[in-house]
Amino acid sequence: MNSQLSRRSLLKALGLGLAATTLPGLVKAADTIPNIVVVGGGFAGATVAKYLKMWGGLSVQVTIIEPNSTYVSPILSNLVLNGQKTTDDLSFNYLNHSQKYAVNMIHDTVDSVDNVAKSVTLGSGQVISYSKLILAPGIDFDSVAGHDFDKVPHAWKAGAQTNLLKAQIDAMQDGDSFVMTVPKAPYRCPPGPYERACVVADYLQNTKGYTGCNVTVLDANPAITVEAGTFGAAFTTYGINYVHSADVVSVDSDAKTVTYSVSGATSSSMTATTLNVIPNQKAGQILFDAGLTEGNWAPINPLTYESTKLNSSDVPQGLDIHIIGDSQGTGLPKAGHIANSEAKICADAILRALKGLEPDSAPKTNSACYSPISSTTASWLTAVYEYNATTKLMQPIDVIPGNGVVDKYAAGGPSTENYRAMFNWSGNLFADTFA
């Protein structure tokens, strides 16, 4: 059987007309309609639910379980810190999912997963059975001794934390200090911490007009992880103090003091007026509770995003459980744009599987990101990943950027044109996920 079906062929194989890309498909008998449960309503979860219904129509039931009625995008959230955006600007509800795509929305938490009975138990006690389960819980944090998020915000999950950090930055006076930490890779949004340092420094210097504020970045990584040339130059321009290989040891949240060790040396401490500690990250707790992790992340098959975790009897513990977004344990970046891309591959694979078809044997994903460097300029970075049948991994492929140099990553330096393009990019991504 040809596993590389076009979307037209897929829809025909599913028994759906081409209108199924925008309209519901054909109705099956109620007792045969698969129920696909999605846990998490971020870029991964919201996208996969939408596309399962767009492509599968009434041949599938789809339920999203998400505790919040609105989702606040981490993308562009650093612009809240300089007043160019508000968290309301970046908040999205699920009305289109429920009203336009007939996705069943349940605002609750998931307490446990029973992969034998194929059910999830909610915080309310309700038990929901599934044919396929898609877990998209996003990130969780490794704990740091003494770190109180209500006093020293991470602001890495957008919303109240973002507003708290903004309020602390707005309260700063000339001569005050801002200290932030960068977690060890992998973490959500690779350029995000570096863009935050630039946005904050630009805000303090060029919006507030302060000349005596100090900005320090304590990076747990041995070097700037992405766009090193762009961010390194910006750090020099802003006078940002950059310290690499700085592992956070503890935090005194009342004193706003962070203790860290550089390359294993004797610990040092730094006190700030505003302290922003972004902890090391890991998969959402539900994946640890369900036994679907290896190390900090959840291994999956990149062709389907189905869990590959095995139990002691070598029976696939993740059978019919798919994991997408930041919690997945491939080499793909952890970011909203690529989570949206993963979700479409997962939706396609599930709909094929329900008809007994093989998944696409050569899927591709795209990771793209714009990073504000100031209130008027932004840079960008993109890469295309494809499945390597030998390594069974998604790996970046060569691209040819504007300068004609073959590379696996294309990038553009800070410019006002890129700043304007950033909003077109983000607007398209927001619409594709939530509209």
Image (spheres, helix red, strand yellow):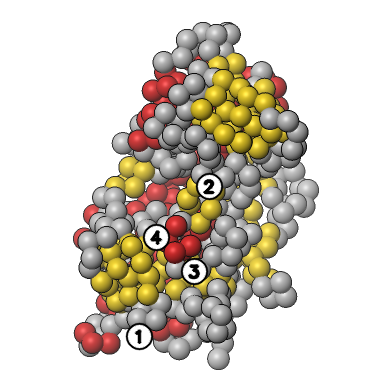
Q: Could you give the CA–CA distance between mark 3 and mark 1, rounded to whole angstroms?
A: 36 Å
Three-letter residue code for mark 3: Gly
Rendered position, 266 above or below 351: above
Element marked by disc 2:
loop
Three-letter residue code for mark 1: Gly
Q: Which residue does the image show at 36% across and 43% down from the upper left? A: 72
Nearest the viewer among 320 and 57 is 320
Q: Which residue does the image show at 55% across and 73% down from the upper left? A: 309
Query: Residue 178: where, in percent of width, then height?
Result: 54, 21
Q: Could you give the CA–CA distance between mark 2 and mark 3, rounded to whole angstroms?
A: 17 Å
Element marked by disc 1:
loop
Indicate which disc, 4 or 2, sits on the residue closer to the N terminus: 4
Three-letter residue code for mark 4: Gly
Rendered position, 263 above or below 24: above
> What residue does disc 3 label?
291
Rendered position, 160 above or below 66: above
Q: Report the residue that reaches farthest toward the bottom.
A: 1
Q: Could you give the CA–CA distance between mark 4 and mark 1, rounded to whole angstroms?
A: 25 Å
> What residue does disc 2 label?
142
Q: Which residue does the image show at 49% across and 69% down from the upper left? A: 291
Q: Could you give the CA–CA distance between mark 1 and mark 2, rounded to whole angstroms?
A: 46 Å
